[in-house]
Image (cartoon, rainbow, N blue to C red):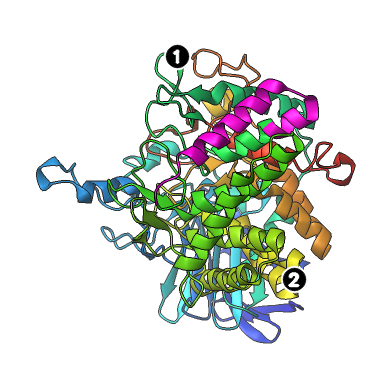
């Protein structure tokens, strides 16, 4: 779509049009000279030059509409006003007797446009967002984006309505708004520096469909910042490290249950976590790790891997409840409904996909397990039964009787993804039609709201994880049906997921843990609006790569490369020492990193060596390494 941009002097600055429609005004400043240059269609570089150096500056752009939608990528979607804004600790707290409750805390997210205590617009330091200093707004016909170019990585941003306009600001020096969880934000920002030149990138795009035009902002920023960087390790080395960690996580309980521990934590030494230890999907990824060991056995003849993989899958099948479903957590599960134990769509959907695959591996190893496929189909049947007439499936159900616990949230799309796989494997038309209905429902939810919610099971918020099954499910439907609608929907989901992807490298303070570890933010993804960065995008790296082949857009391959490279950051080879602790187990990796302002972990790793990063890397490699894939056809 054409993005023909013009600008001309106006009474209060420089006025822009896009395809003949008013697009806003870059506000002038007395005594300063503003210049504009066209970088590509719809993308303009704004340079302000001063007569003398200054530490303080504001570049202000006024879009000619009250926002239909606004975004600060990875920080604010809309105004962060949705049902799932509290975390599970608050839910648990509300379920306790009043005399046992902890002191209530004020919200820890940026709501609305203005600080309710000061009345000032929220201001976000540039490195809080996945695109540096970025803001985005859309009206009925035109959208506007603003971000910092590579030579201007400092300052802050703000976005807010003013009368019938939307104001985008880039501000210097660095600053960040008051918020309860950040007691002294001013201590975490760089000291101001005086200079004469301040620069910003403006991005204009028509709104052909609501809540999609942000792709223009992301694409422009990616072109500014992308640099091809070689992965740190070969496929074979990553595979061996992953198999090693999976075997270290393998655990046999006194009651006979066999599973993969959810991860190692530090208690004076590295030990397996003592509670909420076993999960079929999400953080625990028991089924995926079992499949990787079975795949390893097929590749190498490793009898130990075969025995452990089958033992874990058999244990989960044996844990089946009277309802006919497996539990999603073998021991404790405090998510989504206070203290009541639940099963959830994220784990069940993952389990169905992995059990379908496990049936294939077991047969190839000469150990048929038809019960694996039977459980996968039973989960698909459950999804059919709980789906409403609109295609909504739900987030979680009480384990005891499968009555609904939480209906809202995009998490139900994980079960839509299971229906896609079930339709492909069984040819069942009811699975296929239900998958179509559900995938359409959840994509519509994304384009109606401008966000997805509740995929990160311990945080009921706007997040990245709940967008993943929208990408994967729609691509699966496209392959099954050939209907272009689903490829287009997959791209919408991919651009949403890309709002969470770090487009740039941030330098960390000398001597900080992340500086010592050589951590690079580029290509990583934010967990949720609560902050933190993780390599969870490994779970959909192939789907992002597939989009390049299906659409011809090279940027998808580049984004996949960024995901893959970032997903290898700081994996232990068995000798890695961080913060003076004992060497980390071979193949282990931090769950998350705090690359920006954080209440407890500024510029530091989580020190929580969870199972899922290893599981997702191995899962990705199962599509690459022979005999299941062909590396010559797939380079990440």
| Residue 183 within the magenta-colored segment of the rendering | no
* Local secondary structure at mark 1: loop
Q: Nearer the viewer, residue 493 or 555?
A: 493
Disc 1 crowd, CA 10 A, few/some/many (<14, 14-19, 20+)? few
Disc 2 crowd, CA 10 A, few/some/many (<14, 14-19, 20+)? some
- The image position of residue 622, as x and y in percent, is 74, 39
Q: Nearer the viewer, residue 536 or 423?
A: 423
- The image position of residue 231, as x and y in percent, is 76, 34
* Above or below 354: residue 419: below
Marks 2, 1: nearer the viewer: 2
Image point (69%, 48%), residue name: 541
Q: Is residue 38 visible?
A: no
Q: Which residues are magenta?
A: 294-322
Image point (37%, 38%), residue name: 599
Q: Nearer the viewer, residue 290 or 174?
A: 290
* Above or below 307: residue 636: below
* Local secondary structure at mark 2: helix
| Residue 310 within the magenta-colored segment of the rendering | yes
Q: Determine which of the numbered discs, if any, sits on residue 552 in the image.
A: none
Q: Main secondary structure of the magenta part?
A: helix
Q: Is residue 448 visible?
A: yes
Image point (25%, 51%), residue name: 106
Which residue was labeled with disc 2? 481
Please identify the residue farthest to the bottom as the structure is shown. 20
Quadrant in the picture for the N terminus = bottom right
Which residue was labeled with disc 1? 269
- The image position of residue 182, as x and y in percent, is 35, 42
């Amino acid at each position: 779509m054409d993005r023909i941009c013009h600008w001309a002097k106006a009474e209060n600055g420089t006025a822009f049009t896009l395809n003949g429609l008013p697009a806003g005004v870059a506000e002038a400043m007395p005594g300063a000279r503003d210049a504009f240059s066209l970088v590509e269609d719809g993308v303009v570089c704004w340079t302000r030059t001063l007569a003398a150096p200054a530490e303080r500056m504001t570049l202000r752009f006024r879009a000619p509409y009250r926002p239909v939608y606004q975004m600060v990528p990875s920080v604010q979607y809309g105004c962060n006003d949705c049902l799932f804004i509290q975390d599970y600790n608050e839910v648990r707290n509300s379920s306790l007797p009043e005399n046992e409750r902890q002191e209530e805390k004020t919200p820890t997210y940026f709501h609305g446009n203005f600080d309710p205590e000061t009345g000032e617009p929220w201001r976000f330091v540039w490195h809080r967002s996945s695109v540096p200093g970025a803001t985005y707004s859309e009206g009925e016909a035109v959208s506007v984006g603003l971000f910092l170019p590579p030579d201007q990585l400092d300052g802050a941003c703000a976005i807010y309505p003013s009368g019938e306009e939307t104001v985008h600001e880039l501000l210097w020096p660095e600053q960040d708004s008051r918020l309860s969880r950040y007691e002294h934000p001013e201590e975490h920002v760089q000291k101001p520096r005086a200079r004469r030149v301040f620069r910003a990138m403006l991005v204009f795009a028509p709104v052909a469909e609501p809540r999609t035009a942000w792709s223009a902002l992301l694409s422009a920023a990616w072109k500014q910042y992308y640099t091809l960087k070689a992965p740190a390790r070969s496929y074979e080395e990553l595979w061996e490290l992953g198999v090693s960690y999976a075997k270290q996580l393998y655990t046999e309980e006194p009651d006979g249950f066999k599973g993969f521990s959810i991860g190692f934590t530090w208690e004076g030494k590295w030990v397996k976590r003592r509670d909420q230890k076993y999960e079929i999907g999400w953080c625990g990824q028991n089924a995926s790790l079992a499949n990787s060991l079975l795949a390893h056995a097929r590749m190498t003849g490793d009898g130990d891997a075969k025995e452990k993989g089958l033992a874990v899958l058999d244990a989960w099948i044996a844990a089946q409840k009277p309802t006919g479903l497996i539990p999603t957590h073998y021991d404790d599960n405090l998510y989504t409904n206070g203290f009541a134990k639940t099963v959830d769509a994220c784990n069940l959907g993952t389990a169905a996909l992995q059990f379908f695959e496990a049936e294939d591996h077991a047969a190839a190893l000469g150990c048929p397990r038809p019960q694996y496929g039977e459980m996968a189909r039973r989960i698909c049947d459950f999804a059919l039964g709980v789906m409403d007439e609109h295609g909504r499936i739900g987030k979680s159900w009480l384990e005891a009787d499968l009555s609904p616990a939480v209906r809202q949230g995009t998490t139900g799309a994980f079960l839509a993804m299971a229906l896609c796989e079930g339709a492909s494997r069984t040819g069942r038309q009811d699975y296929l039609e239900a998958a179509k209905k559900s995938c359409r429902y959840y994509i519509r939810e994304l384009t109606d709201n401008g966000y997805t919610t509740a995929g990160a099971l311990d945080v009921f918020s706007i997040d990245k994880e709940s967008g993943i099954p929208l990408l994967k499910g729609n691509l699966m439907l496209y392959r099954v049906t050939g209907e272009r609608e689903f490829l287009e929907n997959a791209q919408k989901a991919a651009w949403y997921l890309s709002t969470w992807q770090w487009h740039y490298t941030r330098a960390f303070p000398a001597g900080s843990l992340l500086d010592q570890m050589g951590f690079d933010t580029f290509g990583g993804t934010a967990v949720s609006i609560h902050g933190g960065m993780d390599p969870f995008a490994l779970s959909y790296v192939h789907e992002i790569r597939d989009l390049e082949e299906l659409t011809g857009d090279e940027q998808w391959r580049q984004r996949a490369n960024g995901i893959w490279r970032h997903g290898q950051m700081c994996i232990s080879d068995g000798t890695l020492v961080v913060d003076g602790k004992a060497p980390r187990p071979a193949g282990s990796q931090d769950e998350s990193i705090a690359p920006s302002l954080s209440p407890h972990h500024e510029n530091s790793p989580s020190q929580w060596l969870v199972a899922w990063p290893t599981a997702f890397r191995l899962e990705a490699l199962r599509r690459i390494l022979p005999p299941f894939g062909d590396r010559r056809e797939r380079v990440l």
